[in-house]
Amino acid sequence: MNTSSDAEIYFPERSRASRPMPLRSTASYRGTIVDRARNRAFNYESHLERDFLYVTLVSRDVADVHEQPPAVYYKDRSGRQKKHTFDALLLLRDGRRVAVALKPSGRVARSGIQSTLELIRAQVGPNFADLYVLRTEQHAHPDDAADARLVLRARGFVDPMADRIAMELAAKLDGWCRLGDLARAIGAGGSGFNAAVRLIGSGVLIVKDQTRISADCLVRIRPN
């Protein structure tokens, strides 16, 4: 059957995770994030992985994210071969690669992850990544994850006209302005709010006192 439509339908690229998500598990929190700017899906298996992905996907320092990249092989302290799958491999815009291990802070000591990272850093080193880091829930505030989720969502509803008006109005701002007021000036409905949020995500606008993004937060154009 042939169908036609004025609007093209885009299907995101599947997750590149090397480890398939378990179909049934009582110990994990599973899901998928679709980044429409990258037109790709990203899998996560915990709240920590989800929030890390949200923050990382909107970071202006990160060029690409490979969640759960292929495992690396190393020898433990007794000489036995082991393998480890990092939770993410980041490609930064300056060209560096960062291998990230994510652990809840309460599980860091008993997991032995610090020792594992030391061994991989020494044995594998730059063949896989330039930096090897451990991150816990203490490295990201819940508001940062919520803001990142909002930015990611706004990037999925791109409106070139709203973006043009938003940039013109932002350039004329003299001091702080309520985000809700700016959004209404850009356009009715959600298009104005999403356009303003995209300006925050791109760094054109800054939020006063780094408060959580909302219609009531104060924004201004980033000083030169």
Image (cartoon, rainbow, N blue to C red):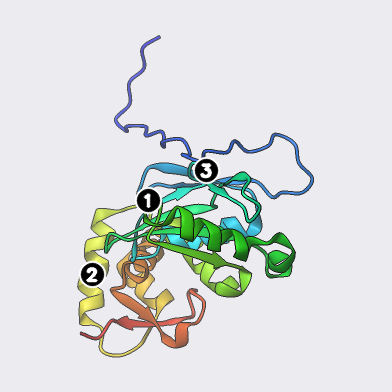
Residue 43 vs residue 200, the one in the foreground:
43
Q: Residue at x 32, y 32 (%)?
A: 8
Q: Is residue 16 left or right of residue 110?
A: left
Q: Give the residue type that dot 3 points to.
A: Ala
Mark 3 and mark 2: span between their CA atoms? 44 Å
Task: Check disc 3 and report the residue beneath it.
Answer: 71
Q: Earlier in the sequence, mark 3 or mark 2?
A: 3
Q: Farthest front residue?
A: 79
Relative to 36, 95 lies left or right: left
Dot 3 lies on which element?
A: loop
Name the N-terminal-most of marks 1 and 3: 3
> In the displayed structure, would residue 199 be above or below residue 124?
below
Separation of residues labelled 1 and 2 (CA atoms): 42 Å
Marks 1 and 2, the one that precedes in the sequence = 1
Q: Which residue is mark 2?
A: 167
Q: Spatial distance from mark 1 to mark 3, Cα to Cα?
A: 13 Å
SS at badge 2: helix
